[in-house]
Image: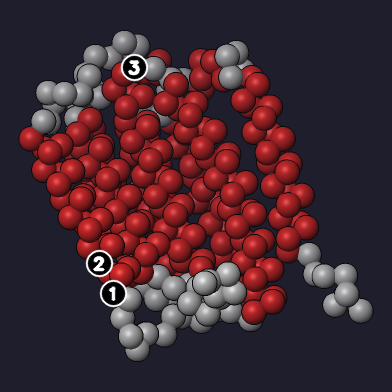
Amino acid sequence: MIGTIPLSEVLIVSGALFCIGLCGALLRRNAIQIFLSIELMMNSANLAILGYGASLGTREGQIVVFFVIAIAAAEAAVGLAIFVSLFRHTETIDVNRVNLLKW
Amino acid sequence: MDRLVFEVAAAIAIVFAALMVLSRNPVRSVLSLVVSFFALAGCYVLLFSPFIAVIQVIVYAGAILVLFLFVLMLLNVGPERPEKTGRPIQTLLSGIAIVLFAGFLLSTLRHSGSAVPRALAAEPNVLGKPDALARELFGGYLLHFEAVSVLLLAALVGAFVLARRDRGSRA
């Protein structure tokens, strides 16, 4: 229990968000929507980390999440720059039509 | 009370995350995710992490998703058109993901409260205090903090190089 919230509840929410993100990453074709789904999966992991941190009574969880958010910001910047560059070359960000590296 | 608020916030987060995945229009998708991240920030507050909740709102809902919207408007991509042939492999894999989640849900509910550590070593209200968090962050994690700042600089330069027009096509 974290205060009055059971840890199992936090983990269930985190798992649900992760699965929604996974389905989105698999089913969408727009590269930006796939990227958004990945962000959602990262957030679900953050939620699980914070839940465990609070349940163990340490601040380590918050520190890990702080670093994860900073790295997510860097990742989003680079990822979106890649999409802009991709769009300039191929005029699309539909992942089905970007198959240059596909065997 | 806390539990009820947490459940409501978590339900909002899950519903809007599902809307994000289901909508074909990318702009609508980003806006749903903003709502979902706000609700998640509410969950973080209830998990004694108010500082992380504020960072979530400022960095995620504020900066990162605005960057997404900005790129979407820059590229002007329309909504996805329905595909003629389905995506059998992907549908199968996401079905497996849902089944795994159902299994996880059942096992968590069965072991609810038994296998998880429930001791609260620190006082909950002390846990999320920003000054204590900062002392820990700049104490034992100073090197990591500096490494992250170098990483952000590298990402900045990398994004600039990637998104820049090629020299040949400028003229």
x 73%, y 60%: residue:
B162
Q: Which residue in the rendered view is the most extreme toward the right?
A: B171
In 3D space, how far apart are the residues under numbered discs 2 and 3 (Cα atoms)? 40 Å
Determine if marks 1 and 2 fall on one subunit. Answer: yes
Of B104 and B130, nearer the camera is B104
The disc placed on residue B102 is none
Residue at disc 2, secondary structure: helix
- State the image coordinates of residue A101 (x, y, percent, origin top left): 58, 69
x 51%, y 66%: residue:
A32
Q: Is residue B59 left or right of residue A89?
A: left
x 31%, y 81%: residue:
B86
Of A39 and A29, nearer the camera is A29
Amino acid at circle 1: Pro
- Within the image, what quadrant is residue B128 found in? top left
Residue designated by label 3: A57
Q: Is residue A97 left or right of residue B75?
A: left
Q: Is residue B163 above or below residue B104?
A: below
Q: Is residue B77 above or below residue A16?
A: below
Nearer to us of marks 2 and 3 is 2
The disc placed on residue B92 is 2
Amino acid at circle 3: Gly
Q: Are marks 3 and 1 in contact (CB under 8 Å)?
A: no
Q: Is residue B100 left or right of residue B85?
A: left
Disc 1 chain ID: B
